[in-house]
Image (cartoon, grey):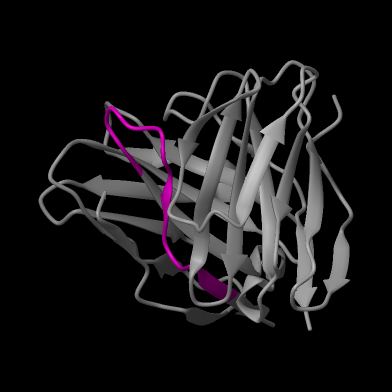
Amino acid sequence: KAGVTQTPRYLIKTRGQQVTLSCSPISGHRSVSWYQQTPGQGLQFLFEYFSETQRNKGNFPGRFSGRQFSNSRSEMNVSTLELGDSALYLCASSLAGTGAYNEQFFGPGTRLTVL
Amino acid sequence: AQSVTQLDSQVPVFEEAPVELRCNYSSSVSVYLFWYVQYPNQGLQLLLKYLSGSTLVKGINGFEAEFNKSQTSFHLRKPSVHISDTAEYFCAVIEAGTYKYIFGTGTRLKVLA
């Protein structure tokens, strides 16, 4: 079974630009969550999508948005990029959600550098 | 959980020595606890989890952790580490009734030859 895939793996943008990251979950998984990982901050939860609906949201500004398609693939968009948005963005999929009894499987991440 | 604390940002240890990575959390409700490992250029992989039952939990690659409710801790241990255990380790918590993982800031384990 293929794992969670994320594209692109690396991305360099400049301040003010926007970016779209993509995540393909494990086949059959309906939940996709996004995290931002930065040194010293660990992983910060961005949002979770389940069956095309945003079900949970972290404490990030509105510049961070996402969506999920009918095939469970998800995209995350960041508009008006700031230097502080440089991070590793991780996607995780699970069968039914992010509850404790639903194991999350993580992708390798997209490393975004904002210059 | 209000927070998850991993006090040690880096832990160097010699090969075949034992290691303990510390994790403490703060919460006023029941929690579920997890340890994840992240190898270079890879995503996170679940090492072990505590959901209920025995407070001593065994995971993959010879790791184990013990849930101590009174001390609000979930320390990760391995009796003898290998070079291949060099990675970053994250402790995470979910409060009962919620769906959000709260992650610690990670501990970088470096195993020395």
What residue do we see at 10% from left, 50% from top?
B70
Q: What percent of the width, then of the height, locates residue A85?
A: 64, 71
Quarter of the figure that contains the N terminus of chain A: top right
Quarter of the figure that contains the C terminus of chain A: bottom right
Q: Is residue B3 left or right of residue A111?
A: left
Q: Is residue B57 left or right of residue A6?
A: left
Reply yes or no: does residue A65 show up in magenta: no
Q: What percent of the width, then of the height, locates residue B24?
A: 27, 61
Q: Quadrant of residue A78?
A: bottom right
Position of residue A66 relative to residue A94, above or below, is below
The answer to whether any part of residue B81 appears in the image is no
Q: Total marks drawn? A: 0
Position of residue B110 relative to residue B99, above or below, is below
Q: Which residues are magenta?
A: B94-109
The answer to whether any part of residue A115 appears in the image is yes
Q: What percent of the width, then of the height, locates residue A58?
A: 45, 48
What residue do we see at 57% from left, 76% from top?
A39
Reply yes or no: does residue B108 show up in magenta: yes
Q: Quadrant of residue A112?
A: bottom right
Position of residue A10 relative to residue A51, above or below, is below
Q: What percent of the width, then of the height, locates residue A79?
A: 70, 60
Position of residue A18 relative to residue A82, above or below, is above
